[in-house]
Structures are given as structure tokens and as C-alpha cells.
Image (spheres, rainbow, N blue to C red):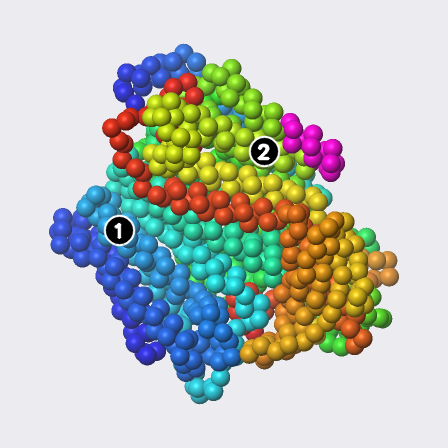
Amino acid sequence: MAQLGHGALLLAFALALLGIAFSVIGQRKRIPELTIAGVRAVVAVTLLLGIAAIILAIAFVTHDYSFQFVSSRSSRDMPLRYIVTAFYGGQEGSLLWWATAASILGSLAFARNRARFPNIVPYAAAVFLGIQAFLLYMLCFVASPFSLNRITPADGVGLNPLLRDPGMLVHPPLLLTGLASFAVPFSIAAGALVTGKMSAEWLRFVRRWTMIAWAILGAGIFFGGWWAYHVLGWGGYWAWDPVENVSLLPWLTATAFIHSIMVQERRGMLKVWNISLLLASYVLAVFGTFVVRSGLISSVHSFALSDIGPYFLGFLAAVTALAVGLIAWRLPLLQSENTFDSMVSREAGFLLNNLLFAGIAFATFWGTVYPLISEAFNDTRMTVGAPFYNQVNGPLLLLLLILMGIGPLLAWRQTIVPILLRSLRAPLALALLAIIGVLAFFGQPMAAIGIAAAVFAIGAIVVEYWRGARLRRKNAGDAFPVAIYHLTRRDPRRYGGYIVHLGVAIIAIGIVASTFFQSERLVVLEQGQAVTVAGYTIRYDNLREQRSRDARIVTADLTVTRGGSSETFEAHRYFFNRFEDQPTTRVGVVTLRFTDVYVMLTEWSDTGAANLHIFINPLVTWIWAGGFVYLIGMFVIFWPAAQPRSVQVRVPDRQGALGETAG
Amino acid sequence: MSSAAATVTSSRTRRNPWRNGKLLIAGGVLLAAVAFLVFNAMGSSMAYFVTVGEMQASGKDLTGQQLRVGGHVEPGSIARSGFGDELRFSVTDGATTLPVVYNGTVPDIFKDDVEVVVEGTMRPDGTLEASSVLTKCPSKFEAE
């Protein structure tokens, strides 16, 4: 089996190289058959990677411990769901996952669009196959998931206890797929730069695939935060750790891109900037992988240091050189067709949005690599912590949030300010109420401003929806909910974008509330004793021990009371078999009145007293709810638009210009 | 975009060249603001990142300094006077050691020999008063 898997990878590697030659030569010498074969190599590579992945998955499920990778990541007592996740629980497997996921998306992008873009796709496929060839080389010769044990052990080592959590089912696969899938838009852009054929249709093609990569990566980051929150026990979901930061960087540049690309679609402007953002997104995805895997920057979650670092550095250099070289070469083709007419226009709004995203990305990058910079120039290694990111990115995110409310109401080219102000009246009034409310009840001016900005954005989105729905109601006589449905179906990009914005605003409220109003307390309690933190009374009832198949579990039974309502919950400590010296926390979380009571059982004495670390986290559930809204918005965006019916209902933008989208 | 409209745009721009200039100024102001925020925040949240050996070798008086020190937990050094009291342990690089006191929750995998990054302030007596103790997980995605 292992030989078969290894063979599939070797064959895929050879086919990838062959495919590059075929598509490039076929295109240059005008031999269509050769070109077609080259593009089809992407599909063939995908099938072979699929075979390799299936073989590895079967080895995991059947406990085939002759595979080194299987025996070092799984064991017989593990539940099936974690045995399956052990697939990407290590370097070799996650590389295989990365290559396979990218390959599937690449096949979908290239095989289906070859006829539509006969010039671009062959070169795009060649660049893509080059990327795949690198990954396949790593899988074949550097980090093979199919290495065999000299002696097959009776049982495996098992997966690291920290990874045995439902978060493992969603976060790593989505994040890896998200990062990997930026190879597709990167290749499409590279192919267009090579051929110099950057049509409007190409723009839609590349935008669509950027959105897909961006959506998957965003979901991956989101579930990472959710996982960290309920398993790491420090009461938060984002720590500005280097590993987190590098996964955020490509998401930031891609988010900037999917906004500013609309300026290019509408006005033919910002071409150099857009293509740079797009190519940078993949370069940053590779950079992140390199940083994470090489141990270059010290992080809390340092992955096992390995020898793939130098290879990735070489790959990073190659990808960067390709990106910079192509843009420099094609600079004459990337001239702007228009100039800005007004400071108060949709395009100026997008430009500001981009500068803010770029600012956040730069600050995050700077803080992450600062230890290296300071060591190189100053000989002392300095690090910056979470306060740095909060101080820099906080104000920038606040501006973005406000802009998110105003931006969609701006007209292209030039906005008539009084009309803009009129439609901002309701959101502004709501924001004012929010400021007064937060200040009156909770104090904290910074929090009041943050929440007011989010409320303002939500208000503006509601106004946009309401305006569209009212028009539709007038013209087609639909009931309000029906009108909203049809509105969304007619222009999913625009109205789906608003739903994403709504999700972001809800998340922002959750982040502001849980950052500014968190309470924390470390206590030792005897059984039956209670403590009150921020108005929530937590009683420690009982300590007990139980056994599951793969672990010994110590449980503290707890009751929380506030006002008339009370709720029981449990905080656990797991001692997994073979990892007895690494007890693993399962935080006890219960939500009362939108506030998380978050308790970590850290220790217990022989008498049954417990050392508890208690956090009161307001509105963290809003973050998860906002994330859910965000995902819904994403699905709406990708939902095919309904064809215009006989009743033409145009939704005018402010001042009557037909608004295409607000992203 | 019809060509007529494009012509109108460009001629208008030619008459009003300051429009793009204004935009550049706005962008410049924003970039300056970002630079200021970065510079400003650097000062308040920077910390030396050193290993125990580097710290002792530098010979500098680090009292009151914000430090991040990397090293391993010295085997047998973890002690605590009573249940729920502050924790004392030493961080070592094999040759030199640094005593640490910490009042908080240690990560799950905190134990003898594990690699840690301790962040805190230096007391006059040469003990590091830790505000956070981070263990280097064997990794998020790798077994030990």
C-alpha cells in the first residue's frame, strides 16, 4: 500500500513537470492537442494525489502501523473521528492535504474554463503545476507520508492530547485548504500577466477564485479562534501570536483585493495595486507556512521544527520573484483608464478601505518579524506583544468599521453630500444612542466608541436593505420579506456582501465587549464553597473521576447563579493514555444572558479543594453568532444570481447610479 | 464606460489636477498615521527576548526591565509553598539558571524540562516576576 501511495506521488510529480512542458510548448508552437494535454495534467495530478490521500486515510482507519506517519500520530484507543483527523496532525499529512486540496480546486478552475480562456489557462495551468511540482517533490523526497517503520509496532503513539478536540475537525483542514487555494488565483493572475490578456471576463474569473480562497481561509481562521477559546484556557480567542498573525496576513490582503477589484471592474483603475494584492496573498500564504514550519520566529505553538524550512524559503523566493518580475514586466499594460473624480466617491471609499487593510497588514507583519529585524540591526532580539497590535490595529479597525457603514452608500465617481448625510441620519442616531447607553451603564469610552461604530455599520446595512426592499415593494408589490428575498436573489454579490458586513459588525461588538468588560479571578474553593465574580456566583459542588476509552477524566461540577437563573456545568481535566504527564483542559463554559462564565480547573488537593481560574466573558457568543452570519453571507454571494424576470426592478444606488455591489 | 464619458472625465481631470493631489495627501496622512501608531505602540509594548545564558552574559542590570526569557524548566525546581499559592521554578539553558515566581495558571503541558517563554519584570533580587508563562507546545500539530 505504501509503495502504491509513494508511486502515485512520484507519477504525479513526473506528470506535473510534463504538464508544464506540454502546456507551454503547446501554446508557443500552437499545437492545441499538446496544450489540452498540459491542462489535463492538472486533473491527472489531482486524481493521483487523491489516490495517495485515500491510501493514507485507509491506513489510518485500519490501524496500519507499518506507516511511520500513522503509528506516530494515532493509536487504537482513539475515537475514529480523531484517527481521521490525525491525517493532517503532522507535517507530512498536512502537506498531502495541502497539495490535494489545492489540486482539486485547480482542476475545477482550469479544466472547466479552458475553452473560455484559451490563452490564459494554459499558462495558468503551467504556473499551477509548477507549484504542485514543488509540493510533490517535498512529498516524494523530503517529507514522505509513506515512510515505513522498520519494525511495525503493535499500537501507535496517539495524537497529541491538545489536538483531540472537535476543533481539530474543522480548523486545520479549512485553514490549510484556504492557504493552499490561493495558488489558484495566483496562477490565473500569472497566466494573464504572461499573455497580457486581462479582459473584464478574466477579472470575474480571477475574482471568483480569490473569493473562494478568501472564504475558506476566513472560515479556517474563525474556527481557529473558536477552538483556542474553549481549549486553551486563557479566556481568549486571539492572542496575536506569530502563527496566528501569519495566517491573517493573506486574509487581509485578499479582503482588500475583493473590495478594490470593484474599482477596477467599474472604472478600470488601481490595476497595479490590485494585481499586487492578489499575488501578495499567495506569497504571504507561503511566507506563513515557511515561518510556521521553520521555527524562524518563536511562537507559542511552535510546530515540530523540521528540515522543510530551507525548501520553503527557496519556494518563497521563487514565488516572490515570479510575482514581482511579472508585474514589473507588464507595468505598461496596467495603466489606469480613469482618474479619481472626487474625494467623496465609492472609489475613494474603496481606496481608503484598502489603505486601512494594508495598514493593518503592515503593522501585523512588522510586529511579527520585528524580532528578526531588531536582531539583524541592533543585535538584541526585541519582541512586541498583544498590546502593540491592539494599539495599532484597534484604531484602524475602528475606522474600517465606520467606513463599512458609509462606503456602500457612496455613489461611484461623485457623491452628493447632503443626500449621503440624509441616509446616514438613522444610523448616526442609533450610534449616538449606543454611545450614551454604553457610557451610562458601563463607562469605558473606548468600548462605547467601538460598539457605536458597529451599531452605525449595522444601521447603514439595514437602511440599504430597507431602501431596496421598499422600491421592490413599490414596483412589484411584494410583501417585505419576499421583497428582501428577491432583492438578494437578483444581486447576491451586493446583498450577500451586506450580510457579510452584518456578520463582521456583530463580531466587532462581541470583540469589543469581551475585550473591555472581561473579568478574571483565580480562586481556591472547598467543595460547596462559592465565589462571586462580576455579579455571577459560581459554586464548586463536587469533584469526581471517570474513565473513557482513551483517557482518565477529572471533573469539577459547578453551578452558576445570577439573579433568578442558575445553571450547572462541568470543567474537566483529561489525562490521556500515554500522555499522563500532559493533563489537558476542557474548559467549562456556560452562557447566561449573553455572557460566558468560563471556568478552568487547574488543580485539586487531596481534600477535594479545587483551584479554579474563572473568566467572565461578555458577548463572546456574539462573535460565534456573527461568524455564522458571515458564513451565511458567503453562501449567498456564491449562490447563482436569479435571471432577470419580465418585471424589471432596478435598484438604484444613491443618486440613481445602478449600484453593482458593495462587497 | 463609453468613450465620450471617458473623454469628459479626462478633460475634467486635466482642468482639476489637484483632485488626485488631494487624494495623495489624504493617503499620505493615513500612512503617516499608521506609521505614528506603529512607532508609538512599539515604545510601550517592546520587550527583550533573551535566553537565560544571554541574559547573564550581557552583565547589564536588568532590574525593572520588561523581559521575555526563553529556556527550559529546570527539573525538580517546581515548588509551591501551599496549594493555590504562588509558584516558584527555575528556567535554565543547561549552564545558567534564572529563578522565577509566578502567580497564575500554568499551561497544560508545564512540567520539568519543558521549553518555556517567561514574560515579566526583573526584581532587584534577580528573580523574574512572571506575568505570563508560555510553554512551547510540543506543537499544535505534532506529536512529541
Left or right: residue B24 compared with residue A52: right
**In what quadrant of the picture does the C terminus of chain B appear?**
bottom right
Instruction: Count numbered badges in the picture.
Output: 2
Q: Residue at x 33, y 14 (%)?
A: B8
Q: Residue at x 24, y 62 (%)?
A: A44
Chain bearing mark 2: A
* Residue linked to disc 2: A455
Element type where label 1 sits in the image:
helix
Give x and y (percent) for residue A628: 49, 48
**Residue A272 seen from this side:** no
Depicted A631 relative to depicted A646: above or below: below
Q: Where residue A110 is drawn, which disc sits there? A: 1
Q: Residues within 10 Å of mark 2 (few under 14, many from 20)?
A: many
Q: Residue at x 39, y 34 (%)?
A: A482
Does the magenta run of residues contain A436?
yes
Foreground pick, B4 / A126: B4
Residue range corresponding to the magenta coloring: A432-446
Q: Main secondary structure of the magenta part?
A: helix
Tell me which numbered mark, 1 or 2, is placed earlier along the sequence: 1
**Residue A356 seen from this side:** yes
Chain bearing mark 1: A
Give x and y (percent) for residue A531: 80, 58
What's the residue type where badge 1 is placed?
Phe
What's the residue type where badge 2 is placed?
Val
Q: Residue at x 24, y 28 (%)?
A: A646
Quadrant position of residue B44: top right
Give x and y (percent) for residue A392: 62, 40
Foreground pick, A457 / B2: A457
Q: Where residue B27 is drawn, which disc sits there? A: none
Give x and y (percent) for residue A507: 56, 43
Foreground pick, A531 / B26: A531
